[in-house]
Amino acid sequence: MVSGVVEDWSADAEQLADLLVASEDIKAFLDGLAVLGASVLSRVTDARIECAVTLERRKRISTIGGSSDTAMVLDRIEQTLGEGPCVEALTRDRPVLLEDSLSSPQWSEYCHALSAAGMRSTLGVPMELEQGASAVLNFFAPRPHSFSSRAVESALTFTGVAGKALRLAVRITVLNENAADLDAAMTNRSVIDTACGVIISQNRCTPQEAFDILRKASNDRNQKLHDLARILVAGVPAHQQAHET
């Protein structure tokens, strides 16, 4: 029995790793993470569970991933009302369980909206992220009392593993964005240098003087330096550019 549980978590961890490799962007990873979370809890509860990922950053809460469109809508109910297990899990940094939306004395508006949407119980589990941001996995079940102690424990274990994967995904995204910014900066620098070469050739001036001429023209025209450089370079024959650079 224990080996079966270990095998299950091993397979789930492997799927998370596959998501990191295969996802085209952070949104695709988050949706995939929510799908996997829903699958894990569906397996444990023997019910169709929906899952959404909620992020709080700079005091703003937003749904950033879901196992389905339904999960996204269910998650946004709390954000609209400003109350519910997910909001409380974010605020208190601990798991929060709603056993039955029809009998709970808490969050009356939220419980009414949740019941109207065909869901009876929810579980919000906070996820540890980098400083300045926090997230919650929000699980939704169509039956009351769906989340037993075993289900809650499974949700905690999954969320712990998923949090590590999400932190890595965020770091990869930041590195990719920085790399893209670096590529753009290098491209812009290259075209500016080429434009300066053209100016040097035409005006018999120093590199610094050429750059000053280009910058002054940029300011006078209220045009970005690299955009003006591209226009200048585009008007010069390719063989002349090669000679001048």
Image: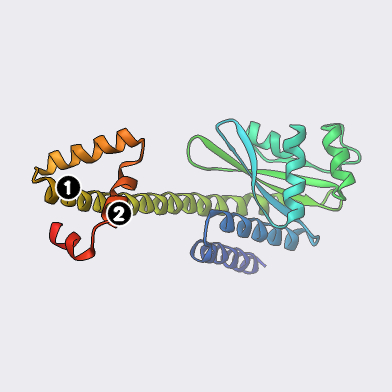
**Label 2 is placed on what type of residue?**
Thr
Q: Residue at x 85, y 33 (%)?
A: 109
Q: Residue at x 20, y 50 (%)?
A: 193
Q: Quadrant of residue 34?
A: bottom right
Give percent across and percent down for residue 244. Answer: 14, 57
Give percent across and percent down for residue 163. Answer: 55, 49
Q: Quadrant of residue 112?
A: top right
Q: Residue at x 73, y 63 (%)?
A: 43
Q: Residues within 10 Å of mark 1 (few under 14, many from 20)?
A: many
Element marked by disc 1: helix
- Res. 150 in view: no
The alpha-carbon separation of the residues under discs 1 and 2 comes to: 19 Å
The quarter of the picture where the N terminus appears is bottom right
Give percent across and percent down for residue 201. Answer: 12, 51
Give percent across and percent down for residue 217. Answer: 27, 38
Q: Quadrant of residue 77?
A: top right
The residue wearing badge 2 is 187
81, above or below 143, in the image:
above
Marks counted in the figure total 2
Q: Residue at x 19, y 59 (%)?
A: 241
**Label 1 is placed on what type of residue?**
Ile
Q: Work out whether mark 1 precedes mark 2 in sequence or the reverse, and give the earlier one.
A: 2
Which numbered disc, 1 or 2, marks the residue closer to the eye? 1
The residue wearing badge 1 is 199
Element marked by disc 2: helix
Relative to 60, 199 lies left or right: left
Relative to 100, 4 lies left or right: left
Q: Residues within 10 Å of mark 2 (few under 14, many from 20)?
A: few
